[in-house]
Image (tube, rainbow, N blue to C red):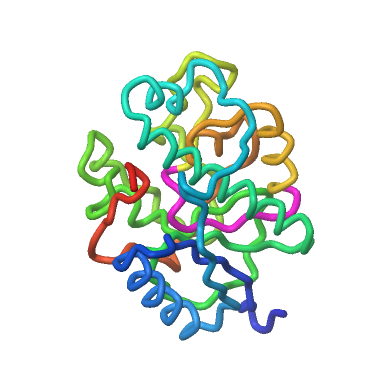
Amino acid sequence: MCSQGSCVMKCQITYINNHTKSIIQAEESYRSFKTYGWDVELISGLTPKTLKTHPPVIEGSRLLEFKKTNENRYLTKLSCAMNHIKFWNTVVEANETMAFIEHDAICLGFPQKWEFEDYLILNAEYVFNPPNKLGVSAFKHFKFPEKKGINSLPDDYPLPYRHENKWKGKFMAPGTGAYAITPAGAKKMLAATENVIDQSDFMLNEYNLKIEYVYPSPVKFNTENLSTSYGI
């Protein structure tokens, strides 16, 4: 439902059950999105303890690197990936564009009638800044072009898929803290991950779907990064 450019968009905030800080941040996130009129729902995410099944992990992937070095981190990242696959199924079943929100996201504005093909980064202004992990790495000097509206990834975007498989060289998502996805995009990702998966943001790459961003960003990060995807 839209009027004068604004809409009501469904969004899912994923948190970790029985994790106090995750619950606190998710509740803060929930209040911020409700304030700006989003149709928001809190969802308890999968964890290594509740993960039951998953597609094979693609060869030459980030996930398999974790499997060799840190089993807990591997299972945690695997659970995160399956949370997205569950969400994409929800989007396809509802046949409407929806937003996936991680527990540490804070809403800054109303959803708009955004016209995009598949996948829309909602927090582009903040993904390369602390407390996000990308903001304390070699990418911290990159900034998305400040062009209002919906934009494609720029040519100097610093996150190509670097692992040795069919996705190598394609731009990938800058984390999955806050994004919207269309039913068409969700269908593409379900097809792409039917037989192989990788870490969540790695499999969300432009081999599989079109990635765009909106500026200004309607979502930012909370002040503390819990780093729960590194192992629970």
Q: Is residue 59 magenta?
A: no
Residue at 56% over, 53% down: 120
Q: Is residue 147 left or right of residue 88?
A: left
Q: Which residue occupies the foreground of this view, 41 or 3?
A: 41
Give the answer, above or below, for where 101 lies relative to 170: below
Q: Quadrant of residue 196?
A: top right
For residue 74, side relative to residue 90 (left or right): left
Nearer the observer, 160 or 114: 160
Name the residue at 51% across, 63% down: 44
Along the horizontal axis of the image, is 41 left or right of 106?
right
Q: Position of residue 3 (x, y in %)?
A: 68, 83
Q: Position of residue 180 (x, y in %)?
A: 58, 58
Tell me: residue 149, above or below residue 162: below
Query: Which residue lies at the image location 35% right of the left edge and 64% below the top edge?
Result: 22
Task: Classify residue 192 as left or right of residue 68.
Answer: right
Q: Is residue 89 above or below residue 191?
A: below
Q: Nearer the viewer, residue 77 or 126?
A: 77
Viewer-proximal residue among 127 and 125: 127
Is 179 contained in the magenta span? yes
**Residue 11 spot, x, y in % from top left:** 58, 68
Vertically, is 3 above or below 198?
A: below
Residue for point 63% across, 71% down: 10
User: Magenta residues?
Assistant: 174-184
